[in-house]
């Protein structure tokens, strides 16, 4: 079946921000930031095996890995905050615009 075409003056599907979906994404990002922050690389520093290049690599990877994952976790938390702000501000803006259009209803 061919997709239905719309005339130039037909209403399209509602455009908008689905706030529960955005909240869910922001919550997931924040939850993941906590999980990533909780990663513990300290056991890597205890990989002792004299003369082992693998053990030496594990020991030396602990601090860079901790810094990298900390940075990723911080970024996810920041993105979560920004998305929550967007969600709140878009709702306020949408309500303001809707009220302005509603005032013109009887013109």
Image (spheres, helix red, strand yellow):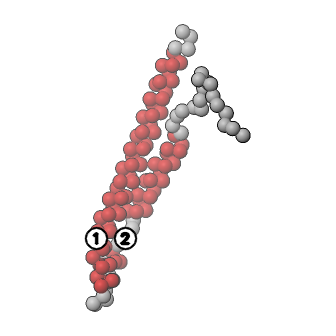
Please identify the residue farthest to the bottom as the structure is shown: 50
User: Is residue 52 shown left or right of residue 80?
Assistant: left
**What's the distance in space between the residues labelled 1 and 2, CA to CA?**
10 Å
Judge the density around disc 2: few (<14), some (14-19), many (≥20) Cα neighbours within 10 Å.
few
Residue 20 at x, y percent in the picture: 54, 43
Q: Which residue is mark 1?
A: 63
Q: Residue at 46% across / 25% down in the picture?
A: 96
* Quadrant of the image containing the N terminus: top right
- Give the mark, 1 or 2, whose residue is nearer the N terminus: 2
Q: Secondary structure under badge 1? A: helix
Q: Nearer the viewer, residue 11 or 97?
A: 11
Q: Nearer the viewer, residue 50 or 54?
A: 54
Residue 32 at x, y percent in the picture: 44, 58
Judge the density around disc 1: few (<14), some (14-19), many (≥20) Cα neighbours within 10 Å.
some
Residue 24 at x, y percent in the picture: 51, 48
Q: Residue at 53% across / 39% down in the picture?
A: 18
The quarter of the picture where residue 8 lies is: top right
In this rendering, the answer to whether 76 lies above or below 46 is above
Q: Residue at 43% across / 43% down in the picture?
A: 84
Q: Which residue is mark 2?
A: 40
In this rendering, the answer to whether 36 lies above or below 86 is below
Q: Nearer the viewer, mark 1 or mark 2?
A: 1
The quarter of the picture where residue 41 lies is: bottom left
Q: Residue at 53% across / 18% down in the picture?
A: 102
For the image, the number of numbered tags is 2
Q: Secondary structure under badge 2? A: loop
* Quadrant of the image containing the C terminus: top right
Residue 66 at x, y percent in the picture: 32, 67
User: Is residue 11 shown left or right of residue 1?
Assistant: left
């Amino acid at each position: 079946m061919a997709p239905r075409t719309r005339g130039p003056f037909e209403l399209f599907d509602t455009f908008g921000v689905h706030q529960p979906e955005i909240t869910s994404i922001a919550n997931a990002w924040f939850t993941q930031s906590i999980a990533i922050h909780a990663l513990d690389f300290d056991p890597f520093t205890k990989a002792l095996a004299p003369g082992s290049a693998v053990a030496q690599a594990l020991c030396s990877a602990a601090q860079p890995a901790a810094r990298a994952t900390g940075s990723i976790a911080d970024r996810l938390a920041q993105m979560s905050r920004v998305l929550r702000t967007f969600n709140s501000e878009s709702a306020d803006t949408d309500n303001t615009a809707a009220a302005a259009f509603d005032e013109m209803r009887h013109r």
